C-alpha cells in the first residue's frame, strides 16, 4: 500500500479549489463608527444598540450600509431591553463597557441569534468582536468576523514626506549640528577620540573659568 506522502502525484488528487474560510471580514463605514461615538457621548455609560443592513457580500467579505436605525430600547450600564418596534434590519451593533470585548450569554441568547450579523462596540477599541450566523436547516452556525473601518479615502502615498533627525551636538561641533536626512544618520555617530577630545576641551574651559573666578575673589580681598 502506498501512502500519500510517498507519491506527490497522488496528493494532487486531494486538492480542491474550495476556499477555506475561518473568519469573515466585515467592512464598516466610518459613519457607523461616528454614530456609535456620538451616542456614547450623549449617554452616561449605558449600553445601546443600532441596526443596519448588509450592502454587499462575497464568500469571505461583508460590506455594511451606512444607513442605520436606532430601535426603541430601555438601557442600563449592563443591559438592553428592546421595546416593541417595527424594523427589518439584519445587522445589529451594540455597546459594551470598555474592556468587555466578548459577548455575554444574554447577548448570545437574545441579540446575536436574532440577527444575521452582530457586532460588539466599545468606546475605547471600537468594533472588538462579531459573529455572522450561517443558517443550516433549523440551526445557525456562528462564524467569527474581523472588522475593518472604511474611511472613504484611498491608500495614501507618503513618499514625499521624509522624517528628519536633529543633532544635539555642542558648540564646538556646530558645523555638524545641522538637520540631516535619515540616510545621513552615520554623520551623527562620533568616534571615541572625538568625544574624548571634546570632553577634554570642556574640562579645560571649566578649569580656566574656575581659576578666573578664584583670581577675582583674591583681587577683591586685596582691595
Image: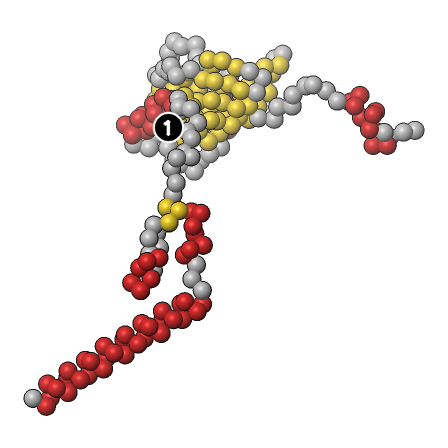
Residue 218 percent location from the top left of the image: 15, 87
In the structure shown, which secondary structural element does the residue marked by tag 1 occupy?
Answer: loop
Residue at 39% x, 47% y: name it.
Answer: 181
Q: Is residue 201 above or below residue 55?
A: below
Residue 16 percent location from the top left of the image: 72, 20
207 with respect to 22 (left or right): left
Between 9 and 187, the one nearer to me in the picture = 187
Quadrant where the image shows the C terminus: bottom left
User: Label 1 neighbourhood size at 10 Å, few (<14), some (14-19), many (20+)?
Assistant: many
**Would residue 145 be visible to someone looking at this image?**
yes
**Would residue 110 be visible to someone looking at this image?**
no
Between 115 and 6, the one nearer to me in the picture = 6
Residue 156 percent location from the top left of the image: 41, 29
Report the residue marked by disc 1: 47
Residue at 29% x, 63% y: name it.
Answer: 171
Q: Residue furthest front?
A: 175
Residue at 34% x, 23% y: name it.
Answer: 35
Residue at 46% x, 34% y: name it.
Answer: 101
Amino acid at each position: 500500500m502506498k501512502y500519500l506522502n510517498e507519491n506527490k502525484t497522488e496528493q494532487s488528487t486531494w486538492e480542491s479549489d474550495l476556499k477555506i474560510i475561518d473568519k469573515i471580514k466585515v467592512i464598516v463605514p466610518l459613519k457607523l463608527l461616528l454614530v456609535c461615538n456620538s451616542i456614547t457621548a450623549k449617554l452616561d455609560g449605558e449600553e445601546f444598540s443600532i441596526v443596519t443592513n448588509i450592502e454587499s457580500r462575497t464568500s469571505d467579505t461583508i460590506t455594511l450600509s451606512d444607513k442605520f436605525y436606532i430601535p426603541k430600547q430601555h438601557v442600563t450600564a449592563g443591559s438592553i431591553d428592546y421595546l416593541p418596534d417595527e424594523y427589518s434590519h439584519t445587522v445589529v451593533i451594540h455597546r459594551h463597557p470598555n474592556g468587555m470585548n466578548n459577548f455575554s450569554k444574554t447577548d448570545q441568547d437574545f441579540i446575536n441569534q436574532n440577527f444575521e450579523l452582530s457586532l460588539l462596540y466599545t468606546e475605547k477599541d471600537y468594533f472588538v468582536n462579531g459573529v455572522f450566523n450561517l443558517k443550516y436547516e433549523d440551526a445557525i452556525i456562528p462564524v467569527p468576523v474581523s472588522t475593518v473601518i472604511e474611511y472613504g479615502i484611498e491608500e495614501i502615498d507618503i513618499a514625499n514626506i521624509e522624517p528628519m533627525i536633529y543633532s544635539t551636538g555642542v558648540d564646538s561641533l556646530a558645523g555638524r549640528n545641522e538637520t540631516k536626512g535619515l540616510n545621513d544618520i552615520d554623520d551623527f555617530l562620533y568616534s571615541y577620540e572625538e568625544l574624548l577630545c571634546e570632553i577634554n576641551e570642556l574640562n579645560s574651559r571649566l578649569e580656566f573659568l574656575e581659576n578666573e573666578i578664584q583670581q577675582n575673589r583674591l583681587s577683591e580681598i586685596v582691595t
